[in-house]
Structures are given as C-alpha cells and as structure tokens.
Image: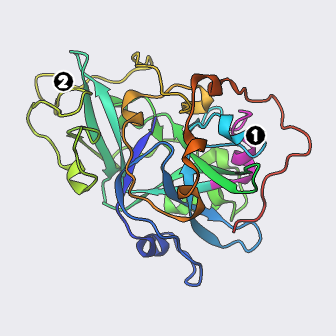
Amino acid sequence: MCRLYHLGRAPRELARQFRLTLDVPLPNFAPSWRIATTDPAPVLRRHPQTGERRLDVLRWGLVPHWTKEPARALRPVNARSDTVARSAMFRGAYRDRRCLVPVDGWYEWQKQPDGRKQAHAFAAQDGQPLAFAGLWESVRWPDGEMLRTFAIVTTEPSTEAAVIHDRMPLALREADWPLWLGENDGNPATLLRPAPDGTLRIWPILSPLGKGRPNGPELLEPTSAPSVDPSPLGTSCPIGASCPIQPAGRSKPSSPPAPSGLSGEDGSGAASRESTSPTSGGLRNTRPTAMPASRWRYSPALMQNPVPAAMPSGCEPERLMD
C-alpha cells in the first residue's frame, strides 16, 4: 500500500505535464519529499461542467459525500482495485469522481530476516512524474465549510515491485488519462493493472521518517552498504548484500496498531507504522490547511462509524468545484 510519497515539482511544471489550459488558475503549494496520510496534496480533476482539467489541493484520506459526521468518518488513503467498483466506500467516486495524483515517486518498507525494515524509493525509470489513479470526494461540514479529500487506487505489484511489497499504487500512462478522468468514453476497469515491468526504478535508502531527517531531496540518496538506520524502523540492507531481498508474498507481517482515525485500504483501519510518523508540512493551500485542528484529532471511539450498505436517501455529491 502507498502511504508516503514525494513531489518536488512546481505548479507550473505540473500544469505543462498534465496539459492544463493556460487560463486555469493554479494552487500554491511547496515541494515535499514526505507527503503522508492526512496531508494536503495537489490532485488533477476534470471540471464536470467545463470539462477542463483542474489542479487543486485536497486532503489525503477519503471522506465520502454521504458521511453524516465528517469528524467521525473513516479516512482510507488507499482503495483496492479489485473491490473499488463494489465497495460502498468507493464505488460512487469510482463511477463519477476519478482523479490523477501527480507524484515523483513513493516509498515502501521491506521486512528483513532479522525483523527490521528496510526503506526503498520507487520512481519512473525515465525520471518523469507519475500519475497515480485516484478518487476524490467532497463533503460539507455542519458550519458550511467544504472538505475535499482523495484516495489512491492500489493494484497487484509488477514483477520488480513484488520483491519489495505485495501491493503498489496504480500508475497510469498518459494515453490512459482521458479515460480515467472521464474525458473519453470507456470502461475504467480496463486500466486496473500494474505498471509494465521495466518502467520503475527501485533503490534502498535510509528511512525518510528518521528523527531529524530534513524534508528534502537528500531523502532519496541511495544507501550502498549496510549501516544503522537512524529511524526506529530498521537497518539498511541493500540489494545484493548479506540479507537478500525475498519476495513480499501474500501474507502481511504484523504491525503495531494504527493511530486512531487513520484508516487503511478499503477503510479497514489498518495502517503501517512508517505511514503515520511526522508528516511533511511542506504543502500549503486554501481552506484545507486552515481547517481547525480539533477536526483532525481522533480517539478510538471515532473509528466505530460503519460504512453504510447503501447511500442514504437525499445525499448527493457536490457537482461544482470552486
């Protein structure tokens, strides 16, 4: 699953990359090499009326539009490709509100034979930004303020990624963007497949969550020899060293309980330890970042909000994007 990624490109560069029209206003956000769950991040959406592509800043962690109490809602950050079309949490957004999440790369951890975890960085072989398949939602707070959120779709890993983890984000080719955004007719289920082998670059790094580590490009520097990792997650173990990398397999290792309010894939409530450490703080924009802190404080009791089997009557998603 994907719970930590990085994006170092400026808004104008992303506008060119994703073919935005020149007169579309762009949000203001800073580069970050440590975008984590609940952080605000740029997302590319299609305006339902004008059809234009829009780059906006949304909060990572999906809150469905039918949520009656946004402060108590689960906030899954990933949606499984094999259940996204039928899951009550995601099926509405999958049908009507698909988006692209621009990234330069992401991080995953691999459990070593001694029980420790080795961090790895993932990026495109050609150095270009990746476009993750995403879903977005909007819900209005009782005071009238609009909350816009997103989740990243995950799929089976490619052969090279399977060595590190048993899931990976769904990265879409540029030719697939119009179908995913709803600009072209077609079945988006045909895009729910892993990236072709040979398109990713993967290398071992020191943990980007280590205490005192800066939020900068130095987080991506490779580690070429076993050394003590400054984070509590484990030691470095580069490919080819004495602790060889084993395929991730289907079974997931046990991990500490997730902090309250951070939900896992498909709203399961599971979250990995590395995904909930200090966040980037580098992105800034509009209302999401000005949200009262009290709305993002959770307790175990807040995790009891179930996903309804069907959408409550009278609830409709927001159709306009301001």
Quarter where residue 84 is shown: top right
Q: Residue at x 57, y 27 (%)?
A: 299
* Spot occupied by residue 87 in the image (x, y as percentages of width and height): 71, 33
Label annotation for residue 189: none
* Spot occupied by residue 97 in the image (x, y as percentages of width and height): 70, 53
Quick check: can you spot residue 141? Answer: yes
Q: Secondary structure at mark 2?
A: loop
Q: In the image, what residue type sits under mark 1?
A: Thr
Count of numbered circles in the view: 2
According to the picture, the residue beneath numbered tag 2 turns out to be: 244
Asked if the stretch drawn in magenta spans residue 102, the answer is no
Report, in whole angstroms, how far the alpha carbon at label 1 lies from the one at label 2. Answer: 46 Å
* Spot occupied by residue 44 in the image (x, y as percentages of width and height): 57, 62
Looking at the image, which is closer to me, 90 or 146? 146
Query: Residue 296 vs residue 237: left or right?
Result: right
Magenta range: 84-98
Task: Answer above or below: position of 29 versus 66.
Answer: below
According to the picture, the residue beneath numbered tag 1 turns out to be: 67
